[in-house]
Image (spheres, rainbow, N blue to C red):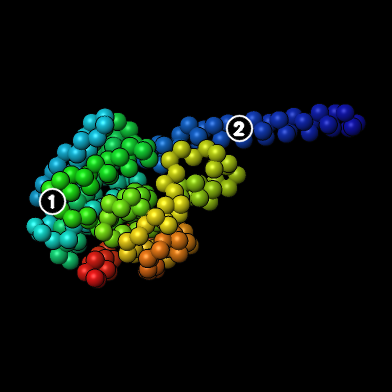
Amino acid sequence: MGKAPALRLFGLVVGAFAGVYGLAVLALFGFQRPILYPLALSDPFLDLAGAERVQVEVPDGTVPMDLSGPAGAPRVAFFHGNAEQIGQTRGDAALAEAQGLAFAAIEYPGYGDAHAGTPNEEAILGAARAALAVLAGKGEPPPVCVGHSLGSGVAVAMAAEGRCRKLVAISAYTSVVDLASAYYPWLPARWLVLDRYDSLGRAPSVTVPTLVVHGRLDPLIPSAMGEALAVALPQARFVVVDRGHNDIRDRELWATIGRFIAEP
């Protein structure tokens, strides 16, 4: 094969690769929110048994918040993961109440029984602010903000804004950009990710005592991310447990959270 045909073949191969790469990038960019929020617009799970349901007003509708637990007890405001709804936090509510804590499960726009459009970072953080404002309107002091997985970024954001008296981040990431870069190293994530949940960037603004708990066996979010976030948080304690990602919220974890909340 002569030089010219070889160059043409090389050009065709490079062009084909560039085309496939471009299509892959466009597909991930276009579908990133369905990937990040897999339970959005799905049928609702049952609400928390015996809980008081409050409809929280947000700019484009309402999101539900389920309140349970003993009156006057320290309140946990719980922000769930991306593949959950508040109806799936019954076990957490029961375990928190066993520690003498009150529980508030806050839903995200577009999830379950929420009537408030589709989820994105701005909408979810707005709903979290509105829900915490409802609790304050009931005369409650700032709650302990607890977030798991995606919800850790919501909890960190609320704490950075001074809306929480303590913070618990479970299976936490540094940012969604960092996660996307880890999952798709060939993707220019810093240019493409829309909902960033930059917990690492917000960390210096968190001035309350913080507990960061991560599963040593977590296959979805590496424990190194949780540790890096804990290092960046001014008053954080980092705890590693022999759990994965979805089995970490057990009795032992809530006992640890209960002791942390009880500390002066």
**Position above or below: 232 against 59:** below
Q: Quadrant of residue 189?
A: top right
Q: Earlier in the sequence, mark 2 or mark 1?
A: 2
Q: Which residue is mark 1?
A: 139
- Determine the residue positioned at 36% across, 49% down: 157
Q: Please give the count of numbered marks on the rendered protein.
A: 2
Name the residue: 24% across, 41% down.
130
In this view, 240 is above or below 30: below
Answer with left or right where residue 52 lies relative to residue 60: left
Query: Relative to 30, is 24 on the left or the right?
Result: right
Residue in view at x 13 percent, y 61 percent:
73
Q: Where does residue 119 sit, x and y in percent of width and height?
A: 34, 36
Q: Position of residue 63 (x, y in %)?
A: 22, 38
Q: Mark 1 falls on what kind of element?
A: loop
Residue 162: mark in rendering: none
Q: Which label sits on residue 22? A: 2
Is residue 128 placed above or below 164 in the rendered structure? above
> What percent of the width, then of the height, locates residue 259?
24, 70
Q: Which of the two residues, 246 or 179, is positioned nearer the viewer here?
A: 179
The answer to which image quadrant residue 186 occupies is top right
Q: What percent of the width, then of the height, locates residue 183?
A: 52, 49
Three-letter amino acid code at the position of disc 2: Gly
**Quadrant where the image shows the N terminus:** top right
